[in-house]
Image (tube, rainbow, N blue to C red):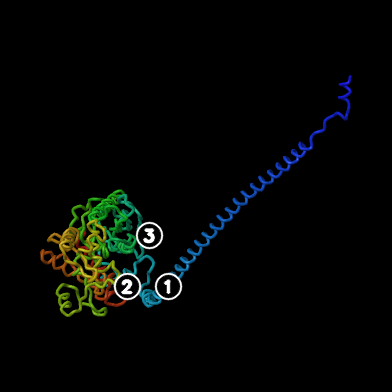
Amino acid sequence: METMEKLNDPGEIQQEPINTKNQKKYIRIIFLLAFFLLLLLILFIFAIIARNKVVDEKEKLQNINSELEKNNTELSTKISYLNKEKKDLEKTISEMMPAIEYFTKNFKNLGMDWLMLGDRFFDLSYAENKIIKNSFGKNGKNFIEEVGDVNNGLNYESNERNVYDLYIPLSAKENKHNYNRIILFIHGGAWVGGEKYQMNMFCLTYGSLGFITASMGYTLLVEKYKDYNMFRIMDEITAAIKAIKAKLVDLGFDGEKLEMAISGFSAGGHLCLIYPYAFRNDSVIPIKFIINLSGPVTLDGDYFIKLAKENDTLDDIYSSNIEEAKEQNRIAIINKDLDKQPPEIGQYSIIMFMNVFLGRKLTEDISEMFDLEKNVIKKSKKYYEIFNKTKYVLPLYKVDNTSIPTLCFYGGNDDIVGIGHFGPLYDKFTECGNKNIELVYSRYGMHNPYDFETEEGINKGRKMNSKILEYAEKYFTK
C-alpha cells in the first residue's frame, strides 16, 4: 500500500532534466542551419552553372560577332571588287559600242546565224543569181525545227567531257540512203579549257547549208582528269566519230556512204590537223579534208611570232615573207615578257604544254627547260627529250605525201598562235611533193581570223566560206 501511495503521489514523479530539453533545441537549430546551408550550397551551384552558361553564351555571341565582322570585311572586299569589275565592264561595253553598232548595221540576222557567218558572208561573193554553187543547196538561214534536228549532249564515252551535239538538216533526212556529207567541229581553249557549244554556231550555219554537223567535247589536259594526255584525246576523237556513225546508222543513214571533213579553232585547229595526219586510219568514217582555223602546228617557240608593230601587217604569211620581215625587225616573239602578258599564251606556256601533252604536270622539270629570270626557253637536254616526244602529236612533223587536203585560215594580227605557223606547214607539204594545202589569209584578222571591221576582212570571210563549199564539192563523193 505504501508503495502504491508513493506511485500515486505527484510530488514523487521525476521531472525531465533541463539539459535534455536544451539539447533537443540545439539539435533542431543545427538541423535548420544545415538545411539552410545545404539550400545555399545548391543555390550557389545553380548560380555558378547559370554564370558559366552566360559566359559561354557571351563567348558564342563574341565569336558570332567576330565571324560577322570577318564576313562583313570579306563582303566589303567583294563588293569593292565587283564595283571595279562593273566599272571595267562598263568601260569595255563603252569601247565595244562602235563594233556593236557596226554589227547592228551590217548583219540583219543575228538570231541563229553566227555573226561571222551572217548575211554579209552568205549574200554572196561565191553565188551566181543568188544560187549557191553546190549540189546540196541552202535550206534556210536558221537551223530551226523547219530546217533540221538538233541532238544535244549525246555521250560517246563515260567521261563527263565525252559528249557531242549532232545537227541533221532536212535535206539529209529526206535523202538518208544517198547522203554522205558530215563536218565535225572541235573547240579551242588551249587544250585546258573550252566547251563544245563554242562551235555550235558553226554547226548551225553549215547545217543550214545542208551538211550534217557535229561538235564534240574532249578531256582537258588538267590534273582534274586522271591519266590526261594528248594521245587520250586522239582516242576520244576516234570514239566520237564511231558514236556519230552509229547514231546516224540508227537513224537510217547508210554508214558505208558517210564521209567527213574535220575542223577546229585554235587548239581545236591543232587537233583537226594532227588527227587526220597521224591517226586517220583509226576513223570509222573516211576523212576527206581539213578546215584549220588558227591552229598551231608545233610547240617550237620560234614559230609563235607576231608583227612587232600592231598596225603593221604582212601582206601574206608564207615563209619567205616572214623571213624578210624578221630581217627588217618587224617580227617579235609572242608574249616573251611574262610580266606584261597572260602566261597562258606566252613562251612559258609552250613548255607547260609540252608537259601536259605527255600527261606530265604543268611545271615538271620547268627549271631545266625555261629560264624564269631571262624569260626564255632553255634548249637543254631535257627540253629536246620532251620536245621530241611531243612530235608524235604535232602536225608539222606528221605531214607526208598522203596527207589529207588542208584548208587553213589565219589572221595577220594573231597574237596568240601567231602568223608563223602556216609557212612551215606549207613548206613541209611542198617538201613531200604534196600540193593539197591552201591558205585564206585575213590580213587584219586576229586570233579569230574573221575580221568584221574592214571590207577586206569581210571579203576574206566570204572567201573562206566559199572555199569550204568548194572543198566539199571537190572532195566529197558526189
User: Which comes before the other along the chain, label 2 or label 3?
Assistant: 2
Q: Is residue 395 left or right of residue 140?
A: left
The residue under the point 71% across, 43% down is: 32
Q: Is residue 456 visible?
A: yes
Q: Position of residue 83 (x, y in %)?
A: 45, 72
Q: Is residue 297 visible?
A: no
Label 1 secondary element: helix
Q: Residues within 10 Å of mark 2 (few under 14, many from 20)?
A: some
The residue under the point 29% across, 77% down is: 455
Residue 120 got which mark? 2
- Quadrant housing residue 216: bottom left
In the picture of the structure, the residue carrying the numbered disc 3 is 146
User: Which comes before the other along the chain, label 1 or label 2?
Assistant: 1
Distance, label 2 to label 3, CA atoms, is 23 Å
- Quadrant housing residue 402: bottom left
Q: Position of residue 414 (x, y in %)?
A: 26, 72
Label 2 secondary element: helix
